[in-house]
Amino acid sequence: MDWKMTARVAMIGMMHLIMSCDVSSSEELGVIQSESWVELGSAMGSPVVQGNTCGAANETTPTCASSSSPDHSFRWTAPTTASYTITTFGSSFDTVLQLRQFTTNHSGASLGCNDDSGGTLQSSVTANLSAGQVIEITIDGYGSGKCGSYKLNITSSGSCPGGCNSPPGPCYNSTGTCSNGTCVYSYKPAGSSCTDGLSCTSGDQCNGSGSCSGSSTCGEGYNCTSQGCTKNYSCYGYLDCGPWNCCVQGTCDNCQIWL
Ligand SMILES: [Ca+2]
Ligand SMILES: [Ca+2]
């Protein structure tokens, strides 16, 4: 497709690369089984690429708007775990922007879709992506036959340089998403097995809200603490109530107890 041959790619704001492939290499042009996309690598910028959809094929339909217009699709890889805002601001027509998990036939799960944004007919989608995550970005037109020149802009609103692989506890999923520079982890489902770190509990499970706990294996009259099973009428100082205070039936009564 001719448009791919003239796609202008601005990389890191400084270097401009004009893709001028005049060969029919399907690999180079990113054409697989009649479906097509252009490789953007991990380039970012405003715009990162510009082109014109008129004359292109209608290869895909966005999930958020009525559309049978020609479209251009790109493969893009998130360089770091971060929030990315992808827009068509600066385009000349009524665009629809679709983000998908990348597949070679436009069938990946939607990662966001937008028709009109900010009081304009152009589109904007913000997505939390992981480092190395490969997505498809499609610029489409609203309704039938809407096409024109476009600008595709990709910016990051905050990164998590180390990635999001350090959940805050055993009841959070191991991989989080980066939102405005902060890793956000979702809870494991209630009933997921976990370890609460206490030697005197068993059957530890997540509660669905990030907490892990199990049933005490201590005998009656004892509490399970980080130090093991402890009589619950006296917490022996430092365990629950601070130095030398009593813990009576789970309540600190400020008595001074000598071990
Ligand atoms: Ca289309
Ligand atoms: Ca629109």
Image (cartoon, rainbow, N blue to C red):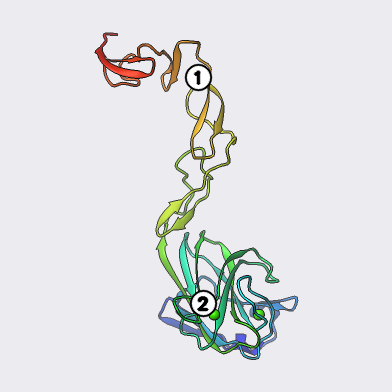
- Whether residue 109 is situated above or below residue 192 in the rendered picture: below
Left or right placement of residue 208 versus residue 249 in this view:
right
- Whether residue 79 is situated above or below residue 203 in the rendered picture: below
Which residue in the protein does label 2 denote? 116
User: Residue at the location (52% across, 49% down)?
Assistant: 175
Residue 26: % across, % down: 70, 80
Left or right placement of residue 148 versus residue 240 in this view:
right
Q: Residue furthest right?
A: 33
- Whether residue 243 is situated above or below residue 259 in the rendered picture: below
Secondary structure category for the residue under label 2? loop
User: Residue at the location (40% across, 58% down)?
Assistant: 181
- The verdict on label 2 being within 8 Å of ligand 2 is yes
Residue 253: % across, % down: 28, 16
Front-lying residue, 162 or 144? 144
Q: Quadrant of residue 65?
A: bottom right
- Whether residue 183 is situated above or below residue 207 in the rendered picture: below
Which residue in the protein does label 1 denote? 200
Secondary structure category for the residue under label 1? loop
Residue type of the residue flagged with mark 1: Cys
Q: Quadrant of residue 142?
A: bottom right
Left or right placement of residue 248 versus residue 74 in this view:
left
Callout 2 crowding tier (Cα within 10 Å): few <14, some 14–19, many ≥20: some
Residue type of the residue flagged with mark 2: Asp
Question: How far separated are the C-alphas under marks 1 and 2?
Answer: 57 Å
